Amino acid sequence: MGAALGTSARLVLRPGLACGAVPRWAPSAPARGCHSKPGPARSVPLKKRGYDVTRNPHLNKGMAFTLEERLQLGIHGLIPPCFLSQDVQLLRIMRYYERQQSDLDKYIILMTLQDRNEKLFYRVLTSDVEKFMPIVYTPTVGLACQHYGLTFRRPRGLFITIHDKGHLATMLNSWPEDDIKAVVVTDGERILGLGDLGCYGMGIPVGKLALYTACGGVNPQQCLPVLLDVGTNNEELLRDPLYIGLKHQRVRGKEYDDLLDEFMQAVTDKWFAAVAPGKGDCAGEVRWDVCDWALLWRHCSLRSFVPAVIAQQYCGARFGINCLIQFEDFANANAFRLLNKYRNKYCMFNDDIQGTASVAVAGILAALRITKNKLSNHVFVFQGAGEAAMGIAHLLVMALEKQGVSKAEATRKIWMVDSKGLIVKGRTHLNHEKEMFAQEHPEVNSLEEVVRLVKPTAIIGVAAIAGAFTEQILRDMASFHERPIIFALSNPTSKAECTAEKCYRVTEGRGIFASGSPFKSVTLEDGRTFIPGQGNNAYVFPGVALGVIAGGIRHIPDEIFLLTAEQIAQEVSEQHLSQGRLYPPLSTIRDVSLRIAIKVLDFAYKHNLASYYPEPKDKEAFVRSLVYTPDYDSFTLDSYTWPKEAMNVQTI
């Protein structure tokens, strides 16, 4: 053992002891990273001064700085001689915001505010989440991505290219924040329903992480948006002089996979350096990435500085094996493959597959309270067989199995239609995912014909084909069942399979409708008004992320997304259902996310997935202590006086 642990030694994680878990002999009260983490301090000392304060969005308060702060920080005179509360600043932003004619202009205003004053940005978002979510995320973020070169103001996030392969750890170390807990990454190949937008796809990770904070309360300084630029196959972008990414065709194959492997390793590796002069074979620098603390402790010559290393584990680490990595808008060919490759090795999930599945199943579970029957009594037809469809289908199977239905019987209740028609056994060139849901049935070419033959209780659109749910399909669904379930989940709004108005009108108000993008309320001729449910993934990923971060969860099983779906469905009241809502109002999303996080944290400890110990007794209080607040901190220096006699000046 002594000879094996020399300079630059690498230790392997011992099974049963996660990196970040506290062994019995380790310090009992680490300074950071465990349950002792305090909430935002009321008074924060700063070393920065002058423009370094006013030009830093994390610190800048605009005209909310007090006179004392301005004098102490050297910014008096750098801002107007006016003192505003955050409420007045909010009012000013709102008045300017309301004067804008287009949603894209409103998006630019909000993103510019985020670059200037982070606390005020989140105060604006949290003041009316229902109002601002369609601007900072779907559907407006899709338009912003399409025009990213035109709207680009200031770099936000980390841009990694295929040409940086071999140096990703260095690039990640360039990020200025010290305590990254969550990364959202995309390669820009399948942005919403808009296709390959290459480097312009950075708007998606930025928007997602804004919702991590606005909806889930995750600290924005612990979040990192990443764009992996491997080129684009979008010829229009390659010809565009304003395009800000690499101008060549997408790199695929081994070179692409090597980049992803290196990225995942670079994000999750932790390195420590310790110097132990005169310690025999361990003299000099010893480096570890994933540490087996028990093995290290047995190495006697290192005992003198092991506690210091452990303290660094909790006090100064940026990334680590428990860093959450959310994959976003990867193409179908890579999404499932990468999820299956990394899901049990890293703390990661794919929002397009698992997040969409969770929110869709939540809507279905809520709809069961309207149809008054069990999930096992339903039959589902999917328009589309890509990431979202497969994710929803797999989670439906899990939900059915939980009710005692066999896997074989569960898959027979799920029918899928792709670009070639109904997916049936014997059809050539089916991938593994599609084979699982292939039915024993003759080939059928059109969705309309499939609906007539199968007579499903629910149709779910996830293929981004606008108008796919024709009036004939909607009429058939209404004739087959008293309360048909109709989910048009494709984003953005322009890609929805049908509108809310069309669904309610054709089905005479009997259709149970949900969409991926927002629709306005619909009033029928008989005076009934319906408020369409929006199956937005924002109900899922902020709460899941907060719970995962709170417990230092090692990996994220699908059971977490099923319990999240169940929790979201429980949040829907009978009054909401009577209005046509299948989801709780977005105005309550912060409370919903908090309860999801508590459920996730509880699940993690019950199933030995958490890394932080001791387990908190009051999980709700602990999760609340982690929630970010947009209230301004005070930067006034601590000042006090001594007794007068103690300050007498000595003279000769």
Image (tube, grey):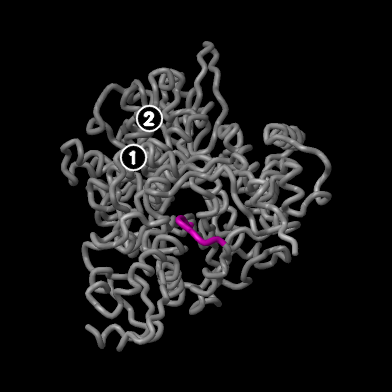
Amino acid type, callout 2: Ile
Say which quarter of the image contains residue 102. top right
- Few, some or many C-alpha atoms within 10 Å of disc 2 (few <14, some 14-19, many ≥20)? many
Q: Quadrant for the N terminus, please.
A: bottom left
Amino acid type, callout 1: Lys
Residue 310 in view here: yes
Comes first in the chain, label 1 or label 2 = 2
Residue sitting nearer the eye, 55 or 104: 55
Indicate which disc residue 518 carries. Answer: none
Percent position of residue 528, x then y = 50, 14
Residue sitting nearer the eye, 173 or 42: 42
Image height check: is 291 above or below 538? below
Q: Are marks 1 and 2 in contact (CB under 8 Å)?
A: no
Percent position of residue 526, x then y = 52, 11
Q: From mark 1 to mark 2, how far is it between C-alphas?
A: 36 Å
Q: Nearer the viewer, mark 1 or mark 2?
A: 1
Indicate which disc residue 619 carries. Answer: 1
Say which quarter of the image contains residue 232. bottom right
Q: Which residue is mark 2?
A: 485
Percent position of residue 457, x then y = 32, 31
Residue 233 in view here: no
Q: Quadrant for the C terminus, please.
A: bottom right
Range of magenta residues: 177-183
What SS does tag 1 mark? Answer: helix
- Few, some or many C-alpha atoms within 10 Å of disc 1 (few <14, some 14-19, many ≥20)? some
Residue at image position (64%, 51%) is 646
Residue sitting nearer the eye, 464 or 599: 599
Residue sitting nearer the eye, 126 or 162: 126
Residue at image position (69%, 49%) is 60
Q: Residue furthest top?
A: 526
Q: Residue 541 lies in magenta, yes or no?
A: no
Residue at image position (50%, 24%) is 531
